[in-house]
Amino acid sequence: MRYRISEAEMDIMKILWERGPCRASEIACACKDRNGWEKNTSYTFLQRLVQKKAVRRREPGFLCTAAAAREEVCEEEFKAFLQRLYDGSFVLFLRDMVNRERRSSKEIDELKKIVAALD
């Protein structure tokens, strides 16, 4: 399933992934602490996630559960990022990241191990 999750919606997903099932009121309190959001703002983003089927809501008490796994969302977001900035090329992305700044010998050794493990 494909999820397009905004940055603000991702904050709510992170809460659910960290804590597990939560009532909407608990999510709103956490968003207030983290982002300074008012309750209605949190509820708006939460409702969008329910509509996208990334979050399941149960009654009573508006109990919310992440329906989308963190790994699945991260993979989809990374693919969208690669497509948007690097025409979908992981090689171009990796080259850009490696060439951005000087790497330590430890980092270079780790990168070599990762590449060697691909064979």
Image (spheres, rainbow, N blue to C red):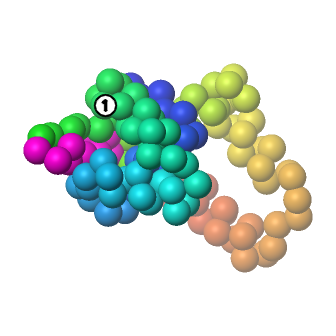
Q: Which image quadrant for residue 92?
A: top right
Q: Is residue 15 above or below residue 59?
A: below
Percent position of residue 65, x then y: 24, 47
Q: Which image quadrant for residue 102?
A: bottom right
- SS majority, magenta: loop
Instruction: Identify the residue at image location x=39%, y=38%.
Output: 43
Q: Which residue is more in the foreground, 40 or 58?
A: 40
Q: Amino acid at mark 1?
A: Val
Residue 119 in the figure: left or right of residue 1:
right
Residue 88 appears in the picture as rendered: no
Instruction: Identify the residue at image location x=40%, y=28%.
Output: 48
At numbered mark 1, what does the secondary structure look like: helix, strand or loop? helix
Q: Which image quadrant for residue 79?
A: top right
Q: Which residue is more in the foreground, 60 or 107?
A: 60
Instruction: Identify the residue at image location x=73%, y=29%.
Output: 85
Residue 115 in the figure: left or right of residue 96:
left
Residue 65 within the magenta-colored segment of the rendering: yes
Report the quarter where the N terminus lies. top left
State the extent of the magenta-drawn residues as a range.
Answer: 60-69
Q: Which residue is more in the foreground, 109 or 55?
A: 55
Q: Which residue is mark 1?
A: 50
Mark 1 closeness class: few <14, some 14–19, many ≥20 residues within 10 Å: some
Q: Is residue 4 above or below residue 38?
A: above
Q: Is residue 19 above or below residue 53?
A: below
